Amino acid sequence: MSNNFNKWQPFIYGLILSIGLLLGIFLRPATSMQTFMHGNNKFSELLNIINQSYVDTVNLEQLEEIAINDLLKGLDPHSVYIPASDLQIANEQLEGNFEGIGVEFNIISDTIMVVSAINGGPAQELGILPGDRIVRVDTLPVAGVGITSEKVFKLLRGTGGTKVAVTIFRLNSKEPIVFNITRGTIPIFSVDAWRMINKETGYIKISRFAENTHEEFLKAFDELKKDKLKNLIIDLRGNPGGYLSTAIQLVDELLDDRKLIVYTQGRSKPRAEYKAERLGVFEQGKLIVLIDEGSASASEIVSGAVQDWDRGMVIGRRSFGKGLVQEPYELSDGSALRLTVSRYYTPSGRCIQRDYTDKEKYDHDIMDRYEKGELLNDLKHANHDSTPYYTMRLKRTVYAGGGINPDYFVAIDTSFSSMFLTDVVSNALIGKFAYEYLDQNRKAITAIPSLKIYVDAYQINDAAFDQFLLFTKKNGIEAPSNDEVKRSKEFIKLQLKALIARQIWRDQGYYSVIQKDDKSIQLALKKLNENQALLNSGN
């Protein structure tokens, strides 16, 4: 692999991992496998023979799971088996809530550090604050004992209504504070940020298509509408998908007149069409959708429908390329199968699913795009089949297979990359330092009256950056040259400022800072000011 790729390897692996669990479109409700499986079969017979006659003791549950995963490898890349132990966490991201005490945390110097208490959660209501250290859970010490995130989840999460005693060490407090917390339902938000970028243009960032996404979108839109929104940017970059029904609900807010949003079809599933049915909140007005290589499945339904109906512009880089629909089946032991049952097609008839004949190539596609230069150069249609499709209103040529190609391309920015930055990112040192820096300067930073003043006026100065370099050196990472530091300095300072903002104003703070130099948003604003057919004819 090239040196350039090595520099970016952590970023690309992080992108692939972020797609992870949510990479799919799920139809509901779940169906029990008992509906489809009757009596004994060869698989059950084989396991019984092994259990009764094999020379050594065997773990049948483990054998079953190995066999199931091997069986699914013969299908598509998105049919997956989820063990019972993992199913709850897998569902939480899409159901939009979990049960626990409601804190976001980092583990720094072998200590659980509270980043924030989630709004409306039990921890916030009792007065747990950002910067608090959790040192004991019930009678169990959790500081200085090699605690892991997985162990923290097990200790703090639990059935709503159950109680847990959390002992907190707070700076400037003489004694530890014990909070007796009753666990409750904690929301997981999928609309991360919304704001007016200028006097006419609203921005909404959606991180996944979960059960509550449509409701969150409407709430964000209503707030922006109060500020006289005329144009809308919907940011689906890095959004790995979620529920098909939620994507349809969102598009229904953008299209009118019973327009086709998407249709699905499979071997045992007849064609099912989904159309705009209600009066949407933004059927008229200039619309732009931002996508990238991490925008998958439900994100591609939204961007595909907007593009096919010439409803607005799609800006960014080619989307992931997932056009398969999964249906969940519950198994008798509490595990589940998410099985691909159909393909989805955009209004023009496109299926944007990438070829998965070669599974290894499929899994490495994002990295291959980088190495081939696609993330740096506009290679439009290079990875699509040759069959042309045509948009519904302007009859523009579009292609199937491989993902949604944007109407306007934005290259990934590598100007700040360096081996020093790669080492810093792979060791999560920017986030760790941001937490410690806020901890040391909390009084001054939290005294800033508003997020807007923070974004406009607060700076990570050179003295703070020098502290960061000392911090990285203390953690075993030292820049090989001043040129490496200089190359990555402004990027690191921006990330530090954004991560500090996240601890105070959550994701709203992070995106408000980070998007100051966002090339996709800058291009979107430029296109909104141009007189183009895609943006001026509504539906």
Image: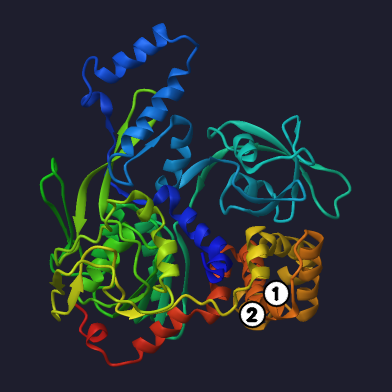
- Quarter where residue 219 is shown: bottom left
In-front residue for pair 37/170: 37
In the displayed structure image, the side of residue 96 where residue 382 appears, left or right = left
The image position of residue 510, as x and y in percent, is: 57, 68
Residue 507 seen by the camera = yes
Q: Which residue is mark 2?
A: 453
In the displayed structure image, the side of residue 462 where residue 372 appears, left or right = left
Categorize mark 1 by other alpha carbons within 10 Å: few (<14), some (14-19), many (20+): few
In the structure shown, which secondary structural element does the residue marked by tag 2 occupy? Answer: helix
Residue 280 seen by the camera = no
Q: In the rendering, which numbered label is found on residue 448?
A: 1
Q: Amino acid at mark 2?
A: Ile
Categorize mark 2 by other alpha carbons within 10 Å: few (<14), some (14-19), many (20+): few
- The residue positioned 33% from the left and 47% from the top of the image is 77
The image position of residue 497, as x and y in percent, is: 66, 72
The single residue placed furthest to the front in the displayed view is 1
The single residue placed furthest to the top in the displayed view is 52
The single residue placed furthest to the left in the displayed view is 270
- Quarter where residue 11 is shown: bottom right
The image position of residue 384, as x and y in percent, is: 24, 67
The image position of residue 353, as x and y in percent, is: 26, 57
Mark 1 and mark 2 lie on one chain; the one further toward the N terminus is: 1
Q: Amino acid at mark 1?
A: Ile
In the displayed structure image, the side of residue 149 where residue 269 appears, left or right = left
In-front residue for pair 315/8: 8
Asked whether the beta carbons under mark 1 and mark 2 sit within 8 Å of each other, the answer is yes
The CA span between labels 1 and 2 is: 7 Å
- The residue positioned 58% from the left and 68% from the top of the image is 7
Q: Is residue 451 above or below residue 301?
A: below
In the structure shown, which secondary structural element does the residue marked by tag 1 occupy? Answer: loop
Across the whole image, how many numbered discs are drawn on residues?
A: 2
